[in-house]
Amino acid sequence: MAERQERSRGPWRALRPRTIRARVTAGAVAMLALVLCVALTAAALLIRELTLSQLRERAAEGARHVVDHIMTERYDGPIPASEPITRFQVIDWQTDEVLAASDTLRGVPPLTEHDPEPGDFRLDDITCGMVAGDQSGDCFQVVGYAVTGSAYGDDVLVLAATRTPLILAENVLEMVLLGTSVALLFGTGIIIWYGVGRALRPVEQISAEMDRLSVSDLHRRLPVPKSDDEIAHLARTANSSLARLEEAVTRQRRFVSDASHELRNPIAGMRTKLEVELSDPEPDQRARERLLTGLLSDTERLENIVSDLLELARLDTDVAMKREKVDLSDLAEGEFSGRRGSAEVLVHTSGPVYAYVNRLRVVRVLTNLVANAERHANGRIDIIVQHHQGAAVVEVHDDGSGIPVKDRERVFERFSRLPESRERDPGGSGLGLPISREIVQAYGGTLVAGHSDLLGGALFVLRLPDPSNPPSEQDR
């Protein structure tokens, strides 16, 4: 049994808050890693290209100044240089002889062995290693211009070089961006893990409480988070469902208990009568006939109780019955006008009064109300059917002793019977009025008891919703 329960909880355990927390965190970090990978690659390429382009442009600008100078005169000494461009050379294009150089490049061979492409006068190159006594082995961005007709003669090459930043020279930029991304992913993962865990903590508490719920302790309720969010709404909705479930189970238990009590009495009486009759060695024929007559009466009472119990079971399980537009005035007149019994029944109507109900069930409600009135009336019952304040209203008045104020709700409890009712109708089940109220409430209406100012006895008021708003097909 325990193993079967554990298997039945398997899917739920797979979706426990901790699992959801891990999945959400892993999914978010993986998505962020993908985005960062694309962004990192694009950023590294963009930063590298923009930085190198700026460096080459500065070197080109310095080289152009040297070109402007040698077009008119030669350098008497070293080529003047200043930060950030401190390396210049003027090279004979044909012999690769260094004709002039800045201080940092004295005695240094040409910065590059490459020449401009045919038809092009500009050279862009990268050179690494020992340059001008530089022991670091760094790389330099070299820009050169081919010049003809200068003070040094034809075909010279003016070179300018600038050091490539360390962050670009040895993939430091990529490493920095990668390290930053890893730190960002780690931090984001921690934040998401903590945030999702904090958000799902109420769910974990709710699931733990749900695991502890059973039929024996339906009074327990789920903890409602203080935050006014979807989880709090879920907890409140679940608590409302638990309250309705607890009420239904309580009603079911009370119903079973009351039904057992009501059925046990007539069955016990019948059993006693049979045992007494069977124990008589010389049974009297007349006594036996009286016994059978009594048993028949008890059987009829049992039949009535069972019929009422079946009706209550149908109502409790909300068995759907087709609704239709019913004229309550016509129904009351057809069922009760000219009715003969212990009391005179008068029906008063003000024209057609419609309601969307099940005809058979409404007939049962009115029959229960009139039958209840007949048991207590002295000689007259008035039924008034009217349309009042957007509702269909049926009032049943009698001239009996009425219902005490303290008992006007009690009469609608199952198997509840007042002393006067037991005296006037010993075989009653005490289910007529409870069934009537539940039928009316199923239609969204009300049924209440009160005092009749018209006849001085009891008054039952049946009120059904406005018939101009019929229920949808789904409600039917």
Image: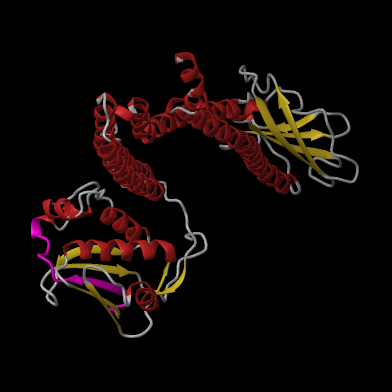
Residue projecting furthest to the bottom? 351
| Residue 256 % position (x, y) | 30, 36
Question: Which of 396/292 is in front?
Answer: 292
User: Relative to 286, is 85 on the left or the right?
Assistant: right
Establish if 377 lies above or below 293: below
| Residue 352 % position (x, y) | 38, 82
Residue at 32% x, 64% y: name it.
367
Does the magenta-highlighted stretch encompass residue 393?
yes
Question: Which of 209/20 is in front?
Answer: 209
Residue at 38% x, 33% y: name it.
203
User: Relative to 86, is 4 on the left or the right?
Assistant: left
Question: Which of 4/53 is in front?
Answer: 4
Number of marks drawn: 0
User: Relative to 65, is 282 on the left or the right?
Assistant: left
Does the magenta-highlighted stretch encompass residue 204?
no
Residue at 80% x, 38% y: name it.
157
Range of magenta residues: 388-406
Please say whether residue 223 is visible from this viewpoint: no
Question: Which of 86/174 is in front?
Answer: 174
Residue at 47% x, 55% y: name it.
320
Among the 4 quarters of the image, the one containing residue 383? bottom left
User: Relative to 67, is 322 on the left or the right?
Assistant: left
Please say whether residue 465 is visible from this viewpoint: yes
